[in-house]
Amino acid sequence: MSAVSDPQRSDAAAAAPTQTTKVAEHHYPGTEVAPSPIVAETLAELRLLFPLFPFVNTTSEPAQVLPYLWLGAAQHAKNIGIASRFTHIINCCEGDEGTAHYTVLKAKGIRCVGFHSEDSANYPLLANHLDEVLAFIRTARQQQGKVLLHCQAGVNRSGALAIAVVVEETGTSLLEACRHVKAARGRVCTNVAFQTQLVQQAIARDWAFKSN
């Protein structure tokens, strides 16, 4: 796994002007952010980094993005041979994939949690779920656990959450975390609304947009 840098977080967002505007054509309600040049530049870089086309394959195995965190798909959680490598599993798509496979996993001592979320332009994924995902991963880390974070395809919902977790856990910049997760998994975060939400979280949580 490639190393993730640990730069000092930028306080550039704190100086943003009070006037607000929408940052993209895809947004969820209440997603106004200050129209600073760094915001526009970061959004443009994310659009280029995570294009919908040309199609890029994801890894056939879960991708390690932190020493204790892997990003994968529902098929990995339902494959007992693969799932048994982990002590904790987070299912971001209970509404799509259900929970029937939890029975076998829990019998093997694997702790499973999950929630329903939508891979859509109007779903506030990070506002709704980032804090609970972080809390679960940090508990697993303290227990020397290994976490599989997945959605249906391991691209958008769990991909965006994985990027945010990498920033929160390492202090690296948003763009560096995006490149790191993409290098590990391949096709991730092509939902432009989730890209916009990452920028909004960077402002709200005082993440650096890019490394110095």
Image (cartoon, helix red, strand yellow):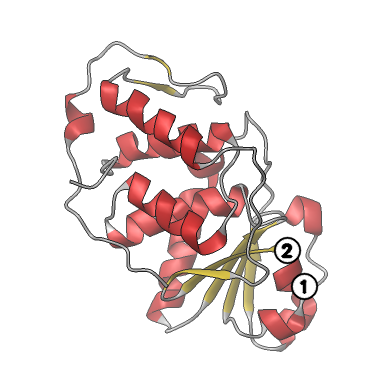
Measure how far apart labels 2 and 1 are at the Cα level: 6 Å
| Numbered tag placed on residue 78 in the rendering | 1
Examine the rendered structure and indicate whether residue 91 appears above or below residue 176.
below
Residue at the right extreme? 100
Q: Nearer the viewer, residue 20 or 139?
A: 20
Q: Position of residue 176 (x, y in %)?
A: 34, 51
Q: Residue at x 55, y 53 (%)?
A: 159
**Dot 2 crowding, Cα within 10 Å, few <14, some 14–19, many 20+:** many
Give SS at disc 1.
Answer: helix
The amino acid pointed to by label 2 is: Ala
Q: Nearer the viewer, residue 82 or 19?
A: 82
Judging by the rendered image, the residue that carries numbered circle 2 is 74
Query: Do we see residue 34 in this rendering?
Result: yes
Residue at the front extreme? 54
The amino acid pointed to by label 1 is: Lys
| Numbered tag placed on residue 62 in the rendering | none
Q: Residue at x 44, y 62 (%)?
A: 135
Q: Position of residue 191 (x, y in %)?
A: 60, 37
Residue 108's image quarter?
A: bottom right
Q: Position of residue 140 (x, y in %)?
A: 46, 75
Query: Do we see residue 132 in this rendering?
Result: no
Q: Residue at x 20, y 47 (%)?
A: 9
Examine the rendered structure and indicate whether residue 32 appears above or below residue 55.
above
Q: Quadrant of the N terminus?
A: bottom left
Q: Is residue 84 left or right of residue 17?
A: right
Residue at the bottom extreme? 108
Q: Residue at x 70, y 55 (%)?
A: 153
Give SS at disc 2.
Answer: helix
**Dot 1 crowding, Cα within 10 Å, few <14, some 14–19, many 20+:** some
Q: Nearer the viewer, residue 72 or 143?
A: 72
Contact check, label 2 and label 1, Cβ < 8 Å: yes
Q: Position of residue 186 (x, y in %)?
A: 57, 57
